[in-house]
Image: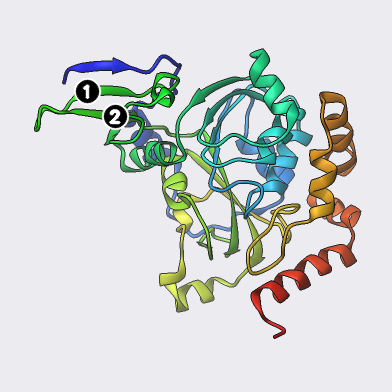
């Protein structure tokens, strides 16, 4: 295959055969109890220098309780796949966790932009679609997948993709390399203690991300009985044998929304986005991350009445009370 052009940035490559062997040796299909807490799951599966991926941003069903725990444990030098990311990237940056970002859509917050502009955090440009496609390639166990995306764009020049001559048609086609994250963190609506997960509503690529990743931590709004999974297996989004840890985390996407359950916490988001420099961001983190020991303590800090108002507001938005 003739390579015609190459993007100019670093790329995280996967040895698909090594990954397949790792999955065979390390993953189990036994129905074992995987229920644990955020602290234990992050200590066990997220390590300094890991490549970290997640499905959705902090604004919609993002794994915020797990991300706060990653910051709380002061994990370092993470390379993240930001398929679609907003305040979560800025939070990880504020906690000193980030080294590199594969960017599909990069967050909000002046501190993040300043870090990118100064080179303190390295970014590699992709699109949301091509980052999802890279995870699909990782899930399929192939080294790359072809796409028309990125062709003729400046994004291609700042990516790790390549343009090749298609051996079948002799035309140009872009190929994007597979990625197999060291760990994925995914927030779901429901899960049983074995790791069978249900997701309702908007998603990017939760199943592909879980399939591609060596380790998978899920946080869930609700823990359901395995018998419910058996009664309606077609509602399962992520099967148990892909999951390594299950964490019960009601309001786990706060201050973002989990559609159908609770809406955004506008006051908390205003507090977050008012942080215009590193010192102000650290003040927010000191209050909401370092100042509590767990997600349960975080919810106590936010307050039950405020959380119930977010739940009621979402019910009104959904028309439950009409």
Residue at x 46%, y 40% (from the top left corner): 128
Residue at x 82%, y 69% (from the top left corner): 308
**Residue beneath disc 2:** 175
Identify which residue, 141 or 61, lies in the foreground: 61
In the image, farthest residue toward the bottom: 322
Distance of mark 1 from mark 2, alpha carbons?
7 Å
**Residue beneath disc 1:** 164
Residue at x 64%, y 59% (from the top left corner): 220
Q: Could you tell me if residue 239 is visible in this image?
A: yes
Check contact, mark 1 vs mark 2: CB within 8 A. Answer: yes
Q: In which quarter of the image is residue 85?
A: top right
Residue at x 71%, y 21% (from the top left corner): 114
Q: Is residue 112 left or right of residue 234?
A: right
Q: Is residue 173 left or right of residue 56?
A: left
The crowding category of the residue bearing disc 2, from other C-alpha atoms within 10 Å (few below 14, some 14 to 19, many at least 20), is many
Whole-percent x, y for residue 190 in the image: 59, 65
Whole-percent x, y for residue 6 in the image: 32, 16
Query: 288 above or below 233?
Result: above
Q: Residue 23 carries which label?
A: none
- The first of marks 1 and 2 along the sequence is 1
Mark 2: secondary structure: strand
Identify which residue, 98 or 306, lies in the foreground: 306
Identify which residue, 73 or 276, lies in the foreground: 276
Whole-percent x, y for residue 137 in the image: 33, 38
């Amino acid at each position: 295959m003739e390579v015609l052009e190459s993007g100019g940035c670093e790329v995280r490559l996967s040895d698909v055969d090594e990954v397949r062997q790792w999955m065979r040796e390390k993953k189990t299909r036994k129905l074992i109890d995987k229920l644990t807490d955020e602290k234990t799951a992050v200590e066990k599966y997220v390590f300094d220098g890991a490549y970290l991926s997640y499905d959705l941003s902090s604004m919609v069903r993002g794994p915020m309780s797990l991300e706060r725990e990653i910051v709380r444990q002061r994990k370092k030098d993470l390379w993240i796949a930001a398929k679609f990311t907003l305040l979560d990237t800025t939070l990880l940056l504020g906690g000193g966790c980030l080294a590199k970002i594969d960017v599909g859509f990069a967050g909000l917050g002046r501190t993040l932009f300043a870090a990118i502009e100064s080179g303190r955090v390295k970014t590699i440009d992709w699109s949301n679609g091509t980052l999802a496609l890279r995870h699909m390639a990782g899930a399929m166990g192939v080294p790359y997948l072809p796409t028309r995306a990125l062709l003729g764009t400046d994004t291609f020049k700042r990516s790790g993709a390549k343009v090749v001559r298609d051996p079948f048609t002799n035309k140009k086609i872009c190929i994007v390399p597979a990625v197999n994250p060291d760990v994925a963190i995914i927030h779901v609506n429901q899960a049983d203690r074995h790791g069978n997960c249900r997701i309702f509503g908007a998603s990017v690529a939760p199943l592909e991300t879980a399939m591609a990743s060596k380790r998978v931590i899920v946080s869930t709004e609700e823990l359901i009985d395995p018998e419910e999974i058996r009664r309606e297996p077609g509602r399962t989004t992520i099967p148990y044998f892909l999951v390594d840890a299950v964490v019960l985390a009601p309001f786990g996407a706060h201050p973002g929304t989990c559609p159908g359950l609770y809406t955004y916490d506008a006051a908390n988001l205003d507090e977050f986005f008012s942080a215009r420099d590193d010192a102000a961001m650290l003040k927010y983190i000191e209050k909401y991350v370092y100042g509590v020991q767990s997600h349960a303590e975080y919810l106590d800090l936010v307050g039950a009445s405020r959380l119930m108002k977010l739940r009621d507001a979402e019910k009104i938005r959904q028309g439950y009370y009409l």
